[in-house]
Amino acid sequence: MSLLRNVGTIGGLTMVSRVFGFVRDILLARVLGAGGVGDAWQLAFQLPNIFRRLFAEGAFASAFVPLFNRRMKDGGEAKADISESRQFAEEVLSFLIPVLIVFGALAIIVMPWIAGFFANEGIEEDPALMDLAILMARVAFPYLAFMSIATLLAAILNSLSRFAAAAAAPILLNICMITALVYGTTLGDGIEARRQVGFYLSVAVTVSGFLQLLWLGWWARKSGFRMRIKRPKITPGVKELGILILPAVLGAGVYQISRFIDLFFLSTLPDGAYTFLAMGDRLNQLPLGIIGIALGTAILPSLSRMIAVEDADGASRLQSNAVELAMLLTVPAAVALFVTGSAFTRAFYTGGAFTLADSFTTGAVVSALVVGLPAYVLVKVLIPNFFARKDTRTPVYTAGASLMLNIMLNLILVPRYGVIGLALAGSIAAWSNVTLLFIVLAKKGYFKLTARVVSRIIRIGIAAAAMGAALYYAMPYGAKFYAGNVLERVGSIAALVLIGAIIYFAGAIALGVVNRSNLAQLKRRPA
């Protein structure tokens, strides 16, 4: 299957999940609002969710996939019957379960201290709100354990080129949360009703983790890959995985580690900052999830196999295609959201407990976040090149340097610009990480940007700039509709999207960025 088709499968299902996520966040904004219970919920949800992204989807997946693929042999669908790969997965699963139980139990016990460390003054000064935040975090934390095991199953399915099942699983999270929020709308709009909704949301999160585990387990069995839980042992395979995971926590999870840093600095800001960042990040996560995660997930198995058979040309071609496709789709998304961020936030979030002023603040946060959007996607695209070679140290050094820059920028920008400065600091740090990754890849001889790819990226930038200028002048014409009725909101946003798409793709075609030859190159089967 080609890179374009793999990315299309993963990205398409991720887009469905993100659409459900938008519905979820629209309900969250209107039911819980910014500040108060809304901030307490965002804090409670971020704790297990950041750990999930950091350890499960970040470090674990990046370290497990190359080792699993190395134990697989050629044979298409028969790969699922290879005893060596199954034995390795069983060893990892058997060791992972008790680790998750112990870690989860400890986290639940010390949750008052964890939540207290990251809580802002608005939460800390209200004992009832602080107790609610701790309760919600405790109820939602088992989600991490369920999703860590689910990630193991997803990594196996992706290695077997069964991308659809894993990409569809997050839809269950949004469905469960939407169900809780819809029920919450029947409870009224008082503070006590909001507290009940927050509790139901935390239950929904844990239930969704269990359902995703069942979903992926069923698909793994259907694919012929059945595992048994054994007595946990530190086998050579488990030890090798552990050695790779420790540095991978930083190397593959810089985005998530920066979220922990964000939580700390958010605790110093006024009420509402948690919600503004979370709602803004939802728009940022749409292209990041559809493009970045899809590309990173799609290329890692193929890249691992190419490197294992010493196909350097094939690996370089695959990496170039991934970079080019990432920029083709991400740069226009970043430019469009930078220019029209406030229009989107007004249309999606304004109403109920979420005021127009809240929407404008969130829009400014979106603009700051998407400055780093192409960089975040490129990190997802470049990191697999290191992990496919079992090189987990280099990403540690580059990520560590960008994190230090992020902290220094936060110290400078957050006191002056608040949550907007925090978002901008993360974006700048992400670009420093990408720059270092490109430099190291070139020096190690893993990958170099060719003149052709650089030329195409420049032309992509020109087409995106033309689109941005058109949107800048078009946006004021729909100002009175962005917070109007449903038809006015949908129509005004659809008009902006249509204008942006027409201008960008017309420019891309005129500049030779999109043509049959390029699409044929992206459709080539990578492995």
Image (cartoon, rainbow, N blue to C red):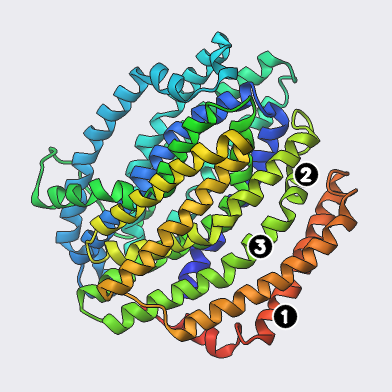
Q: Going from the N terminus, do you reach mark 3 or mark 1 first?
A: 3
Residue receiving disc 3: 335
Which quadrant is the C terminus positioned in? Answer: bottom left
Q: Residue furthest bottom?
A: 517
Residue 346 numbered mark, or none: 2
Q: Is residue 161 visible?
A: no
- Please report the residue visible at 27 percent of the width from the left and 59 percent of the height from the top: 394
Amino acid carrying mark 1 in the image: Ala
Q: Is residue 374 left or right of residue 442?
A: right
Residue 432 on image: x %, y %? 44, 57
Q: Amino acid at mark 3?
A: Val
The quarter of the displayed image where residue 442 is located: bottom left
Q: Residue at x 32, y 52 (%)?
A: 251
Helix, strand or loop for disc 2: helix
Q: Is residue 308 among what the camera can see?
A: yes
Q: Secondary structure at mark 3?
A: helix
Give me the residue at 40% from left, 81% from top.
525
Mark 2 Cα-neighbour bin, 10 Å: few <14, some 14–19, many ≥20: many
Q: Which amino acid type corresponds to the residue marked 2 in the rendered image?
A: Arg
Q: Is residue 380 above or below residue 218?
A: below
- Residue in the foreground of this view, choosing between 262 and 171: 262
Instruction: Give neighbour class at mark 3: few <14, some 14-19, many 20+ (Cα, 10 Å).
Output: many
Please identify the quadrant where the N terminus is shown. bottom left
Q: Position of residue 136 (x, y in %)?
A: 50, 22
Give coordinates of residue 270: x percent, y percent.
62, 25
- The circle on residue 506 is 1
User: Depth check: 438 or 417 in front?
Assistant: 417
Q: In the drawing, does residue 36 fall left or right of residue 474?
A: left
Q: CA distance from mark 2 to mark 3?
A: 18 Å
